[in-house]
Image (tube, helix red, strand yellow):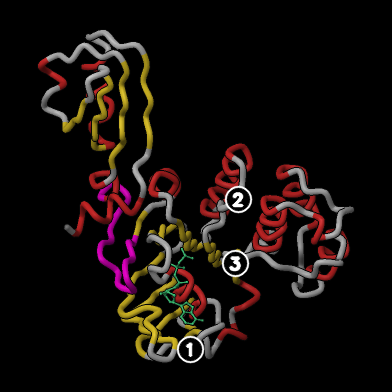
Amino acid sequence: MIKISNLKKYYGKHKGIENVSFEIKEGEILGLIGPNGAGKTTTIRVLTGFLKPDEGEALIDDKKMPYEIDFIKEDIGYIPGEVNFYGDMKINEFLSFNRSFYKNIDLEYEKEIIELLGIEVNKKFKALSLGNKKKIAILQALVHKPKYLILDEPTNGLDPLVQQKFYKLIKKHKENGAVILFSSHVLSEVEKLCDSFAMIKDGNIVKSGTIEGLKDISKKIVIIYGLKLIDDLKKYKYKNNENGIYTFEVKSIELKNFLNVLVKTDFKDIEIKNPALEDIFLELYK
Ligand SMILES: Nc1ncnc2c1ncn2[C@@H]1O[C@H](COP(=O)(O)OP(=O)(O)OP(=O)(O)O)[C@@H](O)[C@H]1O
């Protein structure tokens, strides 16, 4: 289990986090959601043994981080927000270097991830694009099948196809009982993948709970062109301009009902978008 209680960390006078608490059980993925600078990475740095907190406690399997990291580090897989390995090392050299840190790396699993993500093992790390560097970080974090996965905005820089493959890998680790912390500023991916969430803002957890609770907060922006507005649509929040373009805000859990009403009328085109996380925070705390 991962358990964080009243964690506080200042960088000198500058606030990193003020009060962060959450818990993740076996076979569970928690989405740590927050806008830029909210304190996700600071929390993760304590949990991965890089920072000492000023107050509070971060436990991984009852080991107190960062002080007892040596007892647990082989069981942790970590994807950092900024990936940086040795630039001049070829990926296959890096992989054998990585193998030397763990007792029993399953080479079949290593090969499976390389093939699934399309990793080019003969290239030097510095010659890879941002997304391809991220794939190396994924491989490095997962290949020893760790019990604890700590993922700092892991999908940042991945194209949608690779993202889907990554979600599949993570789900497999979850099914095998891993405890997974998934930080993100994309609400929709947390909704799809996680069991629970904790929202962090200005260093404090401002809302947390099951993913069903998150779906109640989250909404879609639906833009409809050339719409003939009917009474049944008027109950949803909308704005329109003179050109017959309507922008609706629909709660995610009401989207299906909304679309069922929409098909009863006439329109030319439709776009469905996720609102920016900042807008959801603004709405929640205005
Ligand atoms: N080394 C540091 N020295 C001073 N302040 C820092 C340092 N690292 C982070 N901070 C500050 O701590 C706060 C939390 O930053 P943190 O990187 O934890 O946020 P985050 O949620 O991970 O953001 P992002 O999504 O942009 O990565 C920010 O105000 C940031 O400026």
Disc sitting over residue 65 in the figure: none
Task: In the displayed orientation, state which residue is furthest to the front.
Answer: 242
The answer for how far apart the CA atoms under marks 1 and 3 are is 18 Å
Q: Which residue appears at 38% of the width and 61% of the height?
A: 34
- Considering depth in this image, is 9 or 245 the residue closer to the camera? 245
First in sequence, mark 1 or 2: give its number.
Answer: 1
- Residue 254's x, y, as percent? 23, 32
Magenta-colored segment: predominant secondary structure: strand
Q: Please, what is the three-letter code of the amino acid marked with disc 3?
A: Pro
- Considering depth in this image, is 10 or 79 the residue closer to the camera? 10
Q: Give the range drawn in magenta.
A: 198-213
Q: Does the residue labelled 1 lie within 8 Å of ligand 1?
A: no
Residue 185 sits above or below residue 244 on the image: below
Give the quadrant of residue 136.
bottom right
Residue 274 sits above or below residue 128 on the image: above
Q: Please, what is the three-letter code of the amino acid marked with disc 2?
A: Gly
Secondary structure at badge 2 equals: loop
- Considering depth in this image, is 179 or 82 the residue closer to the camera? 82
Residue 34 sits above or below residue 240 on the image: below
The answer for how far apart the CA atoms under marks 1 and 2 are is 29 Å
Give the quadrant of residue 151.
bottom right
Q: Which residue appears at 74% of the width and 68% of the height?
A: 85
Secondary structure at badge 3 equals: loop
Tell me whether circle 1 and circle 2 mark residues in contact (CB < 8 Å).
no
Q: Which residue appears at 86% of the width and 67% of the height?
A: 88
Q: Please, what is the three-letter code of the amino acid marked with disc 1?
A: Lys
Write down the residue under mark 1. 52
- Residue 245's x, y, as percent? 28, 21
Disc sitting over residue 157 in the figure: 2
Disc sitting over residue 80 in the figure: 3
The quadrant in which the N terminus is found is: bottom left
